[in-house]
Image: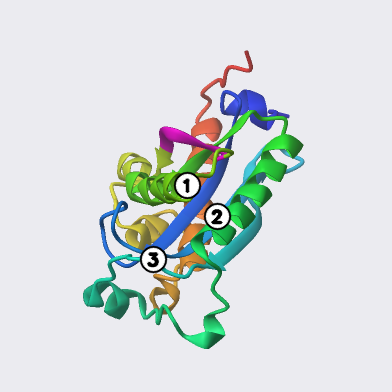
Amino acid sequence: MPAMAKRFRGFLPVAVDVETGGFNASTDALLEIAAVTFEFDAHGRLQPASAMNVHVLPFEGANIEAASLEFTGIDPYHPLRGALPEREALMEVFRVVRQAVRAAGCNRAVLVGHNAHFDNGFVQAAAVRQQLKRNPFHPFSSFDTATLGGVAFGQTVLAKACEAAAVPFDAAEAHSALYDAQKTAELFCVIVNRFQDAGFQISQD
């Protein structure tokens, strides 16, 4: 069976989705982050493993666009959100990811995202802002399921790519970080497993 560390060149894929107060990772609030790890089943097929999500309080001075809140439906300061300060939220996510990296025998995590540059940009910017030195994610490498979905299914929108991949998708649940991360993870698994099923030999060196 393919070892995770050998299959992805020492990286552990982790599907991530963020909900934010805008599009600028440097100035706009990070409001929610979800992460899904992966594992191989007994037949050597990639599948989602554990999932987590954390609600995040906007950092001091963060910009929050009204249009973004309308889109996500998030009330950043609602008392029932159970939101953590940005530093604490990131530390919790990073702790879980580092544990998964060690358990898989990998040396680093690589972010899997739908339009991954966006999600990775917010994760990296928040880590720098909070001066967190032990960021488990590769600073610029990622797997983008928008690109992979376009290649595999001719679809770059998450809902449409999932439909083409026979991954159930409920539009009413979309734009929750946890739901979108889980669907991104399922889509990534379909693509990776189909690539393997097509007979391509994966180097284990």
Report if the CB atoms under discs 2 and 1 are less than 8 Å apart.
Answer: yes
- Which sits earlier in the primary sequence, circle 3 or circle 2? 3
Up the image or down, 86 lies above or below 145; here it is below
Quadrant of res 88: bottom right
Q: Secondary structure at mark 2?
A: helix
Up the image or down, 82 lies above or below 28; here it is below
Q: Position of residue 155 (x, y in %)?
A: 29, 51
Quadrant of res 60: bottom left
Q: Nearer the viewer, mark 3 or mark 2?
A: 3
Q: Looking at the picture, which amino acid does disc 2 mark?
A: Leu
Distance (Cα) linking label 3 and label 1: 15 Å
Viewer-proximal residue, 7 or 80?
80
The question of residue 167 being in magenta is answered with: no
Q: Looking at the picture, which amino acid does disc 1 mark?
A: Ala
Neighbour class for label 3 at 10 Å: few (<14), some, many (≥20)?
few
Whether residue 66 appears in this view of the structure is: yes
The structure residue drawn at horizontal position 22% and vertical position 75%, both measured from the top left corner, is 67
What residue range appears in magenta?
A: 135-142
Residue under label 1: 127
The structure residue drawn at horizontal position 60% and vertical position 48%, both measured from the top left corner, is 94
Residue under label 3: 60
Report if the CB atoms under discs 3 and 1 are less than 8 Å apart.
Answer: no
Image position of 134 (left or right of 26): right
